[in-house]
Amino acid sequence: MEIRYDYQYLVHLISCAVHDLQPQDVSFANVFAIGKVHEVANIAFLSVQKLNIKPDAELYNEWQVFYFHSVQRNARQVAQYGKLTDLLTQNNIRWTEAQGTITKTFYPAPELRMMSDIDFIVDAESIDKIAELMLERGWEANIVHENELNVYPEKETGIEFHTEFFKEFYKGSGERYSGAINHPFSHAAPSADNPCKYVLDDTHFYLYSLLHTIKHFEYAGCGIRRILDLYYLQKALGDKVDSEYINAVLDKYDFAENANKLFALERYWFEGETPETDLSETVKDIILSGNHGTNDIHLRNDLRRSAEGSTLAKAKRNRVKNFLFPTLEELYEGHPEYEEKGYSLAKSRFMRAVENLKPQRLKHMFTFFKRVKKSK
């Protein structure tokens, strides 16, 4: 998706919805499409329906349907949330939550904050039991690894069970993120009406929400919806959290720079505050990444991290070299059958090279090389 100025009008529509203001009339070219990619077209519709000059009937109807779809999606997720939490409680499994299910309560209406899936945090020893309970109900359940379980009871109601706030998602990330915050139940207390439901204290919920957004921003990019989350989090919890503690954590684990960028952008977009620094690169990344980031931004950020203390050109050469000549550990991870058959490093590389000669794999390989070359 090429960056266009249409996003500015989308942000204008959202800001008017946030503050209940009358939006300005303007062209709608590409605005709805960008809104869908960033999962904010629903909240923007609150402003669209107030416009004196509305989009053409076909586009307006499509936008309205998207809004109603978000309402229905929220209703389905609420229903599944109730079923899941009842099931966990009945089986004496303690759980807490730290993402969208809480954040959306800070919005004027929960359906205005679209949610990709429902996230729970549980004890590691509960994962197998939860998987068993899900399968008994005929739901698809996939243990990604010992600390994560994905469940799919129906369309658009994916559920994820985690055992920590963060796991290592790029090399060297684990120490920063898990060092800054982890061990969820040590920051939570049982709910007064449900001893299995643990509620995070405001400071650690706020800190986790911020770090989760920074994680996406650093990894593959984050979109407009996550910046809007920061606005509502600050509005709801800004005066309730231990800011001194949060700032100390951000400084200690080298998050302060990116946190300041994201908060400056939030204040610019949704509070009308002129930024003191140039946010053009941050804005470009946010817009191009969509809500879940892109492979190109992921690769670029990974190369930049690899280039620290060196040069980007060297990082690119090393990336191509590692792609062509992976370690035995990497080969076993990507091709478990090699490990099962006891292949040596030489044989594993040979077998992979043969597989890469297949047309689809060759296409993937040359696409990867092009992406590395153009990354900057």
Image (cartoon, rainbow, N blue to C red):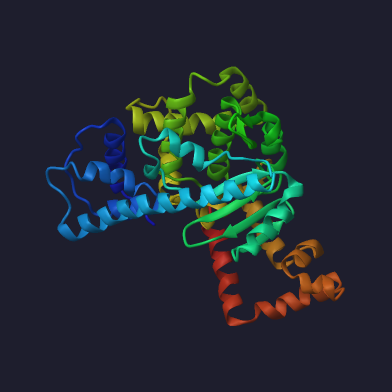
Give residue 368's quadrant in the image: bottom right
- Furthest residue toward left: 52
Which of these two is toward me, 184 or 291?
184
- Where's residue 294, x and y in %? 50, 55
Horizontal relation, residue 173 to residue 300: left or right: right
Residue for point 75% across, 64% down: 333
Q: Residue at x 58, y 46 (%)?
A: 85
Residue 364 pos. (x, y %):
57, 71
Q: How many marks overall?
A: 0
Query: Relative to 248, does residue 358 appear above or below in the rendering?
Result: below
95 left or right, relative to 58:
right
Residue 13 in the image: state x and y as whole percent.
27, 40
In the visual, does 250 lie left or right of 100?
right
- Which quadrant of the figure contains the N terminus? bottom left
Can residue 182 be spotted in the picture? no
**Quadrant of the rendered image containing residue 96:** top right
Please give the name of the residue rendered at 18% of the width and 45% of the height, measured from the top-left corner: 26
Residue 184 x, y percent position in the rendering: 67, 35
- Could one spot residue 375 in this view of the protein? yes
Return the residue nearer the eye: 300 or 12.
12
